Image (cartoon, rainbow, N blue to C red):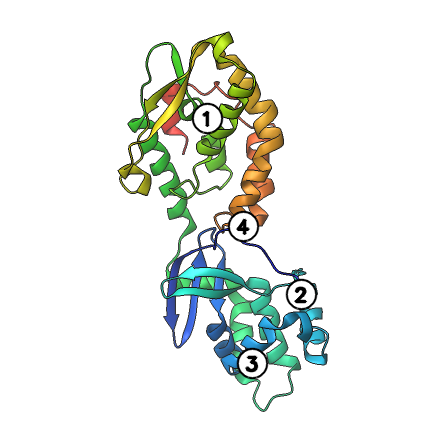
Amino acid sequence: MNEMVQPELPFSIKEIERDGIVMGVLSDGTPYLTGRGLARMCGVEHSVIFRLTNNWHEEKYKPRGQQIQKILMRHGYDKDILFTKTIGPNGETNAYTDSVCMSFLEYYAFDAQQVNNETARNNYRLLATQSFRAFIYSQVGYNPEIRLAESWKNFESRVLLNASVPVGYFSIFREMADFLVQLIRGGIIINEHTIPDISVGQAWSKYWTDKNYNSIYGERIKHPHFYPENYPQSAADIRAWIYPDRALPIFRRWLQEEYTSHRFQSYLENKVAQGCIERGNVPVIMNAVTGKNAIMPGTLPASKMLKQK
């Protein structure tokens, strides 16, 4: 049996129950049904969905599983596991996303040999009319535009909280401001769970040490770094490395040629595994920071940093 490794469980940012159907939205904007919710929409007992999906490595070779597998493939779903383990308001649960839910609904609406297919058929028509995503979003009251606005607010708050560093030094966060602007434009949600400058700072710190740049450009020093009050990190006394201005051209070249080109993809993949980013958004985000319209490091005037909305 193939097992999907998830170092950190994705988390639900919205979850409600409507007419006995539990549904929600993951942190990356992915809508889902729980196993009980999917079972109710299909008009079957939860135990049926539970056994079928938890033993999918065996069930997919049986007649029923083979039919569902064909529908899944038609929907472009080829993973070995049919659900994502997630943390919801009531603890750990299984989240079934768009392709899986629509495939099961189609099977129970039109192919399953059961007494009454009416429940599944009605729900399939409902979701086919307005799309699974639109249905879940409307039911739970989720608006992706509001989340985008929250990203800008979080970014602006951090810029204002870390507005200055000692003369003669640069900070990773301030120098990355234009990079972060491109990420938000690309659709990434910037919050307490997604802080790209930490990844960049750690990678640059190692590069700095490996190259022994203290002896070339001068000593780096620690400087207070602040987070907005809605970030758990705000309670900690955090001091981040800041670097001599003499090394700024080296950092900008490293950020563009080394980190963005060779390391950032791995960062995004890790965020996908954590449920912070939808996999389909990764190419869009990568293009935002590497494409023709990307702002190069250090070229966005400071006066415009807070106007990029």
Between the residue at mark 4 and the residue at mark 2, the CA separation in whole angstroms equals 20 Å
Q: Nearer the viewer, residue 42 or 119?
A: 42
Residue named by callout 1: 178
* 57 in relation to 302, above or below: below
Q: Amino acid at mark 3?
A: Val
Residue 76 point in image, percent of width and height: 67, 60
Q: Quadrant of the C terminus?
A: top left
**Marks 3,2: beta carbons within 8 A:** no
Whether the residues at callouts 1 and 2 have beta carbons within 8 Å, the answer is: no
Cα gap from disc 1 to disc 2, whole angstroms: 45 Å
| Residue that numbered label 2 is attached to | 1
* SS at circle 4: helix
Q: Nearer the viewer, mark 1 or mark 2?
A: 2
| Mark earlier in primary sequence (4, 1) | 1
Q: Residues within 10 Å of mark 3 (few under 14, many from 20)?
A: few
Question: Within 10 angstroms of label 1, few (less than 14), some, or many (20 or more) residues?
Answer: many
Q: Look at 43% across and 62% down and name the residue there.
A: 24
Q: Amino acid at mark 4?
A: Ala
Element type at mark 1: helix
**Quadrant of the rendered structure where residue 91 is?**
bottom left
Query: How far separated are the C-alphas under marks 4 and 1?
Result: 26 Å
Structural distance between the alpha carbons of marks 4 and 3 = 28 Å
